[in-house]
Image (tube, helix red, strand yellow):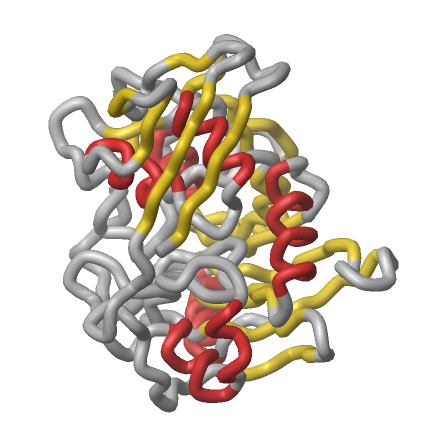
Amino acid sequence: MIEKKFQVESDGNTRLDLFLKKRLPELSRAQIQKAIREGLVLLNDRKARPGQRIRAGDRIELTLTEPGPEDRLEPEPVDFSIIFEDAHIIVLDKPSGLVVHPGAGVKRGTLVHGLLYRYPEMAAVGSAARPGIVHRLDKDTSGVMVVARTPSAYQSLRQQFEERTIHKTYLGLALGRFKMKKGIIDLPLGRHVHHREKISVRTRKPRVAITHYEVLTEFRETTLLALRPVTGRTHQLRVHLSATGHPLVGDTRYGGSSRQKSRYPRLFLHSWKLRLKHPASGREIEFESPLTPELEAILEKEAVLK
């Protein structure tokens, strides 16, 4: 049983779920909202609502049960490469097709299962459902990721992501050509008004989303871009490019052509560079993941067409 009690001091007029998320970084926002809906969070001795506002002087009590045997993750071998590791962090190269953590319809064979197989001590780092995970890549996105190996590293990395001091650069191949060689896409994102499984600029609950882009190479029908997300919204890069009329090739979900699978066998989105401060030393470090062979092959074909 996990029991937490908080006395609100200077967080007046803040949403309850956001207040708890800030103080319990090991829990996801979805987990917190689920606990509130299930009556496991009391606000001034009464059951609370996820979006309820809190005021200075409010008392909050949260009670969670420890995960049962059926909820615990079983380590299993999963294929991925390590770029760097020490006692505090692990920087890895995630292959396309690998899901980062268990979710709807995916219970086995994720990156988390593979991390626990190689690093059993990570089971106690962060969320029990997502041990060590401080950010994620979409299933079909490849490239560099960082995970935490200790609780202190977890807290440090989470804070860096929240404060947007970690810098990520992706490589993406988009359809068409861009008028400006550099630019900013500033389009709020949220769940699509009709298709809830999709992210869209058409949403009832928009959240700020900002992406910097730079043209690296122009081909006949496509453009290779360096993409630097300022915010970290779900599917942000894919939706931003689609909304500007330049969807990523191979992205059949957000506008990429489904008729050219032989030419674009996978989503062309790769986490290229990651710069952060080391949780222990505070030293700024940067890691890079080269393009995968299948993405290099796509660029070679585009160069021939050029």
Q: Nearer the viewer, residue 128 or 228?
A: 128
As drawn, which residue projects farthest toward the left?
Answer: 194
Reply above or below: 204 against 211.
above
- Residue at image point 42% right, 46% down: 3
Residue 260 on image: x %, y %:
23, 60
Reply above or below: 110 against 272.
below
**Left or right: 101 as drawn, with respect to 192:** right
- Residue at image point 36% right, 37% down: 239
**Left or right: 212 as drawn, with respect to 178:** right
Residue 298 on image: x %, y %:
42, 69
Asked where in the image residue 230 lies, by quadrant, the reply is top right
Residue 182 on image: x %, y %:
65, 33
- Residue at image point 53% right, 55% down: 134
Residue 302 in view here: yes
Image quadrant in which the N terminus is located: bottom left
Asked where in the image residue 93 lies, by quadrant, the reply is bottom right
Q: Nearer the viewer, residue 3 or 156?
A: 3
Q: Nearer the viewer, residue 175 or 113?
A: 113
